[in-house]
């Protein structure tokens, strides 16, 4: 943090010490320079703290440590990455269309907020895993929550997946979601081995009828 002769904090002419102190009594001290410009830095909390308070204090010459003036101000520390919630589709779902809607909710409630420019996705399709991208991504901001949605074009098959990542406004590390599985089945079931055969005569009024229904490599039969 740099303070350069502002109305809020202005070291007086002459010799004094400028002290920057936090809640935990960690401090940084420097003598007043002739041009009145003092640069001090201090390591903020490494845990989220929305009520961190820093105090700038001007002191007389070393030895007397008499306070000339001081000013306190609050800062907010966000050391927690955002959360990724409510992915769609559900990994247990089957999809009867080549176009599959995929989405996620990024949430950073109570802290610095979502950096929308970092919200993107990657997915495994027939050509392999894609790079992280925002292509065709629809984003809606609702306060601290950001909803993202896209449409993936995938052929019939299983083993596809999509995942998401995002950062917050203070640059905490990426949050990367788990992979959401996607399964596509646009093929109709098949019928085989019907009985009795069409050209057969039956000698009873109670005729057993049947057929074999198959859905190989698909979502299965809804009995």
Image (cartoon, rainbow, N blue to C red):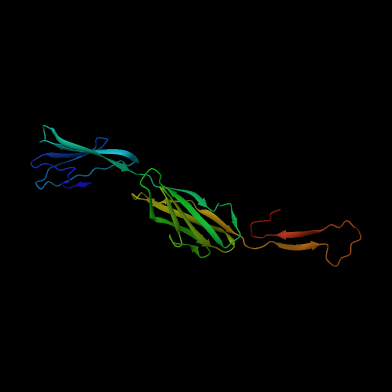
Image: 70 above or below 171? above
Image: 151 above or below 38? below
Image: 146 above or below 75? below
Residue drawn at x 39%, y 55% as measured from the top left: 118
Spot occupied by residue 5 in the image (x, y as percentages of width and height): 15, 46
View extreme (right): residue: 203
Residue drawn at x 15%, y 36% as measured from the top left: 69
Q: Is residue 132 left or right of residue 154?
A: left
Give the camera-side residue of 4 and 46.
Answer: 4
- Residue 49, quarter of picture: top left
View extreme (left): residue: 14
Give the camera-side residue of 166 and 62.
Answer: 166
Q: Is residue 71 left or right of residue 101?
A: left
Spot occupied by residue 117 in the image (x, y as percentages of width and height): 38, 56
Spot occupied by residue 83 in the image (x, y as percentages of width and height): 43, 47
Spot occupied by residue 204 in the image (x, y as percentages of width and height): 91, 58
Q: Is residue 31 left or right of residue 111?
A: left
Q: How many marks?
A: 0
């Amino acid at each position: 943090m740099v303070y350069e002769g502002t109305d809020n904090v202005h070291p007086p002419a002459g010799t004094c010490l400028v002290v920057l102190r936090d809640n935990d009594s960690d401090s940084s001290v420097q003598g007043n320079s002739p041009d009145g410009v003092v640069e001090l830095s201090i390591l903020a909390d490494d845990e989220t703290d929305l009520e961190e308070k820093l105090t700038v204090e001007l002191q007389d010459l070393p030895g007397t440590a008499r306070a000339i003036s001081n000013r306190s101000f609050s800062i907010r520390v966000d050391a927690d990455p955002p959360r990724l919630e409510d992915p769609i589709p559900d990994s247990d779902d089957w999809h009867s269309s080549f176009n599959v809607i995929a989405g996620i909710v990024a949430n950073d409630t109570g802290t610095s907020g979502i950096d929308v420019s970092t919200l993107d996705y990657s997915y495994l399709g027939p050509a392999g895993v894609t790079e992280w991208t925002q292509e065709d991504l629809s984003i809606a901001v609702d306060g601290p929550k950001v909803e993202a949605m896209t449409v993936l074009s995938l052929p019939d098959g299983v083993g596809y997946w999509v995942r998401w990542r995002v950062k917050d406004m203070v640059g905490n590390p990426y949050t990367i979601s788990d992979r959401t599985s996607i399964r596509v089945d646009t093929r109709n079931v098949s019928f085989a081995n019907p009985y009795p055969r069409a050209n057969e005569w039956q000698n009873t009024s109670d005729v057993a009828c049947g057929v074999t229904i198959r859905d190989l490599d698909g979502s299965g039969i809804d009995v």
